[in-house]
Image: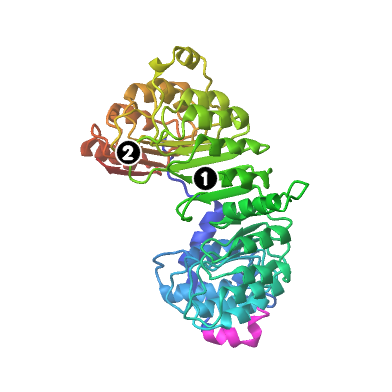
């Protein structure tokens, strides 16, 4: 059932108490004084303030509570308390959602003075009034993770290239760097990892920066541990490397890279050149995580180039047809996607297919991908069962996806075709591991299917349920979840014609009476 409200863990209770009683742990020193205070560096070593004696894991949790609180009860006390918990023991500081009233610049300055051993820093989308920001970088020489989104813009005298040069000089331990939209050019990449010391980077996000194919190659050639590189021109850059090797008639195979994830988004590129995906994958045979947003008109042959990879754990394909409701017949399930499932299905843990793919075969997905944890299908049309007698006979033998935890099926609006048959929907809902289910425009969802699935496993692991525009389900079907046999935390309905305001009010009254700890939202 939706679980009864509990007091929470001892850790949660203590953190809540401290955050509600911040005045008991604050002194009267203003932040501008603290930044210049000679004692600021030594805070936490010889002090009677109990906050300064907390281990880093609790300090990190308290910092998150304060910096991400949208409406703290007392903004002034929250600011003072934040000053107190920024100590040398702090290992993580996330200021990306900082919403308190004081100048963010001062908070950052205080952290640069006190937190010499900070490992993770999220700055997010922030503006600095001057170039002091670069002066702070040397104080964070132990950083391993840095997120600094859109900090640099044209009104400042410093550039993204300056930032990357400073990082390359002072932050040699960086493992994960996210700096999209910071005006970083090839010169910045050169300062970061060619002449710079950031050789241990494993993840680099430089999306929406004016980096050319030359800069992409510099990053790939000078970061031997690199596993993930985000940039809208990465596929084109890899293809360029392969083409250069071919043009120069290099006898051996071009250098291969150790990337484990490849992401391509046609919205970030002006056009897609047929064949570039295949060329890029030849240089990255160890890709196991593939995310593709591809333009309409792409061919089955482009998808089949994925077969050059050794294995896949994650496959996400989004076919962009713009605002068209027509199915794009240039990519078919049988000839474009099914061969991938036959080759990689046993290793796949996540499969996502979005876009108007004609005649998708869900029974084949279930058969060839037995180890899926997440399945997301959207705006496609399932192959009619009567279209192929052989497949219809096989459907009766398909197994249950025992490991499936997250299921999302969305038939898409303005579509008269069914995304999933009643038989296959029941088969998917029969997974005993389901923790999250989202169903949209699914006219085959009925009370009987929900009851049959519940009879199999009582939805014993289900925590999240969303039902959107599923017009065949009624209160009787949803009552299946209002029992004492599931851990449901969130349930939402939207425009399900047979679920009424009265039904929703009755469920809310039941939740209050039973002291259930779950959220119910509805837009009947």
The residue stretch that appears in magenta? 32-43
Which quarter of the figure is the C terminus placed in? top left
Look at the picture and state if 186 lies above or below 462.
below
Look at the picture and state if 469 lies above or below 396.
below
Q: Is residue 391 left or right of residue 214?
A: left
Residue 323 appears in the picture as rendered: yes
Q: Is residue 437 left or right of residue 521?
A: right
Helix, strand or loop at label 1? It is strand
Q: Which residue ends up furthest to the right in the rendered image?
A: 251
| Percent x, y of residue 382 | 40, 26
| Percent x, y of residue 51 | 59, 70
Q: Which mark is residue 282?
A: none
Quadrant in the picture for residue 140: bottom right
Quadrant in the picture for residue 386: top left
Q: Which mark is residue 292?
A: 1
Q: Is residue 434 left or right of residue 192?
A: left
* Front-lying residue, 412 or 137: 412
Residue 117 appears in the picture as rendered: no
Q: Earlier in the sequence, mark 2 or mark 1?
A: 1
Callout 2: 10 Å neighbours few (<14), some, many (20+)? some
Q: Residue at x 39, y 66 (%)?
A: 71
- Whole-angstrom CA distance, mark 2 to mark 1, is 20 Å
* Front-lying residue, 420 or 115: 420
| Percent x, y of residue 55 | 65, 63
Q: Which mark is residue 325?
A: 2
> Residue 39 magenta-drawn?
yes
* Front-lying residue, 459 or 339: 339
| Percent x, y of residue 128 | 50, 79
């Amino acid at each position: 059932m939706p679980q009864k409200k509990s007091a929470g863990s001892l850790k949660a209770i203590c953190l809540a108490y401290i955050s509600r009683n911040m005045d008991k742990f604050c002194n009267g020193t203003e932040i501008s004084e603290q930044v210049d205070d000679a004692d600021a560096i030594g805070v936490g070593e010889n002090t009677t303030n109990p906050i300064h004696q907390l281990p880093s894991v609790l300090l990190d949790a308290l910092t998150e509570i304060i910096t991400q609180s949208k409406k703290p009860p007392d903004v002034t006390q929250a600011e003072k308390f934040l000053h107190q918990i920024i100590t040398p023991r702090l290992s993580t500081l996330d200021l990306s959602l900082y919403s308190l009233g004081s100048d963010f610049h001062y908070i950052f300055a205080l952290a640069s003075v006190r937190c010499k051993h900070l490992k993770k820093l999220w700055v997010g989308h922030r503006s600095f009034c001057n170039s002091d920001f670069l002066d702070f970088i040397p104080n964070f020489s132990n950083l391993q993770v840095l997120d600094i989104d859109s900090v640099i813009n044209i009104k400042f005298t410093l550039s993204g290239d300056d930032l990357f040069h400073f990082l390359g000089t002072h932050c040699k331990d960086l493992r994960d760097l996210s700096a999209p939209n910071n005006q970083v050019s090839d010169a910045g990449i050169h300062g970061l990892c060619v002449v710079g010391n950031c050789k241990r980077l494993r993840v680099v996000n430089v999306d929406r920066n004016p980096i050319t194919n030359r800069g992409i190659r510099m990053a790939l050639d000078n970061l031997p541990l690199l596993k993930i590189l985000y940039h809208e021109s990465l596929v084109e850059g890899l293809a360029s490397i392969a083409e250069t090797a071919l043009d120069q008639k290099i006898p051996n195979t071009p250098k291969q890279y150790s990337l484990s994830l490849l992401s391509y988004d046609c919205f970030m590129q002006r056009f897609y050149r047929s064949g570039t995906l295949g060329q890029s994958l030849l240089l990255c045979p160890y890709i196991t995580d593939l995310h593709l947003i591809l333009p309409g008109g792409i061919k089955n042959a482009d998808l089949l180039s994925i077969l050059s990879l050794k294995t896949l754990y994650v496959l996400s394909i989004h076919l962009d047809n713009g605002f068209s409701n027509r199915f794009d017949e240039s990519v078919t399930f049988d000839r474009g996607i099914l061969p991938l499932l036959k080759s990689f299905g046993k290793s796949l843990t996540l499969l996502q297919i979005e876009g108007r793919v004609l005649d998708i075969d869900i029974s084949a997905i279930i058969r060839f991908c037995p180890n899926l944890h997440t399945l997301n299908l959207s705006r496609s049309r399932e192959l009619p069962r009567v279209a192929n007698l052989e497949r219809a006979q096989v459907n009766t033998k398909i197994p249950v996806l025992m490991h499936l935890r997250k299921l999302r099926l969305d038939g898409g609006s303005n579509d008269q075709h069914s995304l999933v048959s009643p038989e296959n929907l029941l088969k998917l809902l029969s997974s005993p591991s389901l923790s999250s289910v989202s169903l949209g425009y699914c006219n085959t969802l009925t009370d009987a299917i929900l009851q049959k699935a519940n009879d199999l496993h009582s939805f014993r692991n289900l925590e999240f349920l969303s039902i959107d525009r599923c017009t065949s389900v009624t209160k009787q079907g949803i009552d299946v979840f209002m029992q004492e046999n599931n851990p449901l935390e969130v349930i939402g309905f939207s425009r399900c014609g047979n679920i009424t305001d009265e039904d929703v009010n009755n469920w809310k009254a039941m939740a209050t009476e039973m002291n259930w700890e779950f959220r119910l939202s509805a837009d009947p």
